[in-house]
Image (cartoon, rainbow, N blue to C red):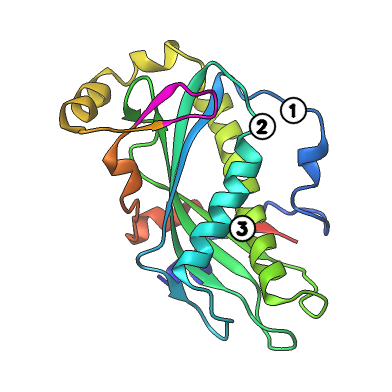
Amino acid sequence: MRHFLFAVPVLLALAACADPTRDLDDPIDPMGDFSLGHVGVVAPNLEKLLASRDVTQDEWIAEMEQALGERFSRFDGGRYYHLGVSVEAYSLPPPIIPGKSAVAMNVTVWDDAAQAKLNPEPKVIQVIKVFESRISKNRDEQLAGLAQEAAREVENWLRDMQQTEGWFTGPDQEQAGTDAVAEDAASADPETVMAPQSQAVVVPPELLEVTRAAALGNTAQGPGRSE
């Protein structure tokens, strides 16, 4: 798991030293037909790296659900998509101790109407705080900020996939995934939950299970970095 954060080519996504939720106050830029259905976060294989403060699985799950919900519940498209997230590794160094705050997680996106994954393999999202002031932040603030940065990286990835792969374009995106739809639908024994608009949203059990993909081949996508 250490390969997640320290043994991969670096793909920089530098951000200004500011509140990672600052863009949430801006006018909403729609993301195609995206509307958030369900966020499923797990952390069964969570690994603490280097000299880090302790953070429990439940704490990571709560923070990531909060950050992802806050960011993606803004969108009001005409189609539901679910996010399945597995938090894999983290570093949350205390003040003065050398190190950088970081988190690595796997993300899977489900199309609710098609009952199929948009990404066959989990996307590795990695955030490393290049410049940060840990002296002025307590543990909880440090954790919340890292989760918010990770949520922002997820949105950046989704927008990139919208542009490059045609995600969140409704029926058009189903044509290329007909076989995957049939396979997933045949094996699914869906769990039904209620969306904010009180419409039934079908969540496949697979979405709620571990989306972990620790193979070294997945780490070649590189981490996102933020200040």
Q: Position of residue 6 (x, y in %)?
A: 52, 71
For badge 1, the amino acid type reads: Ile
Which of the two residues, 54 or 122, is positioned nearer the viewer here? 54
- Residue drawn at the location 60% of the way across and 32% of the way down: 159
Find the distance from the CA under tag 1 to the CA under tag 3: 21 Å
According to the picture, the residue beneath numbered tag 3 turns out to be 147
Q: Is mark 3 on a helix, strand or loop?
A: helix
Mark closer to the chain start, 3 or 2: 2
Labels 1, 2: front one? 2
In the rendered view, would you say 95 is above or below 20?
Answer: below
- Position of 101 with respect to 135 (left or right) is left
Which of the two residues, 97 or 77, is positioned nearer the viewer here? 77
Residue pushed farthest left?
186
For badge 2, the amino acid type reads: Arg
Find the distance from the CA under tag 3 to the CA under tag 2: 17 Å
Q: Where is residue 43 in the image (x, y as percent from the top left)?
A: 41, 62
Q: What element carries label 1?
A: loop
For badge 3, the amino acid type reads: Ala
Q: What element carries label 2?
A: loop
According to the picture, the residue beneath numbered tag 1 turns out to be 28
Image: magenta residue range: 194-202
- Residue drawn at the location 80% of the way across and 46% of the way down: 22
- Residue drawn at the location 33% of the way across and 37% of the way down: 120
According to the picture, the residue beneath numbered tag 2 turns out to be 74
Crowd rating for badge 1 (residues with CA inside 10 Å; few <14, some 14–19, many 20+)? few
Q: Quadrant of the N terminus?
A: bottom left
Mark closer to the chain start, 1 or 3: 1
Labels 3, 2: front one? 2
In the rendered view, would you say 120 is above or below 214?
Answer: above
Q: Are marks 1 and 2 in contact (CB under 8 Å)?
A: yes
Q: Where is residue 224 in the image (x, y as percent from the top left)?
A: 61, 55
